[in-house]
Amino acid sequence: MKKQTALKIVNPLLALAFLAVAGAAVGRRAGLVDGDLFRLVHPNAGFAFITLAVLHLILNWGWVRTAFGGGRRS
């Protein structure tokens, strides 16, 4: 799979995972999400978020190196 195609899949999933983690936390704090739902969604979405964030960094590592001085600059 091409890197750009992978990023088109990873980036929206990363955003959804972030929204699920944040939404569960805010919803729990506001009393809109009960404890059972929170314990189901928050850890699983958090694991997905971390996994997707690492994959996102791997896919963008060339840009990271260039932007922070570890690679060639144009």
Image: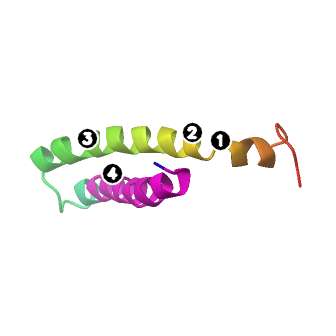
Horizontal placement of 34 versus 48: left or right? left
How many marks are shown on the rendered structure?
4
In percent of width and height, residue 15 lies at 41, 59
- Mark 2 = which residue? 58
For the C terminus, give its image quadrant: bottom right
From the image, state whether disc 1 or disc 3 is nearer to you. 1
Q: Nearer the viewer, residue 13 or 33?
A: 13
Q: Residue at x 19, y 59 (%)?
A: 31
Q: Determine if the magenta segment contains residue 23.
A: yes
Q: Quadrant of residue 58?
A: top right
Query: Which residues, given as a range, are shown in magenta?
Result: 2-26
Kind of residue sitting beneath label 1: Trp
**Amino acid bearing label 2:** Ile
Instruction: Tell me if label 1 and label 2 are in contact, CB under 8 Å.
Output: yes
Mark 1 touching mark 3, by CB under 8 A? no
The percent coordinates of residue 22 (x first, y second) are 36, 55
| Distance between mark 3 and mark 4 Cα atoms | 9 Å
Of pointers 3 and 4, the one earlier in the residue sequence: 4
Residue corresponding to mark 4: 21
Dot 1 or dot 3, earlier in sequence: 3
Q: Residues within 10 Å of mark 1 (few under 14, many from 20)?
A: few
Magenta residues, dominant SS class? helix
Q: Amino acid at mark 3?
A: Asn
Nearest to viewer (mark 3 / mark 2): 2
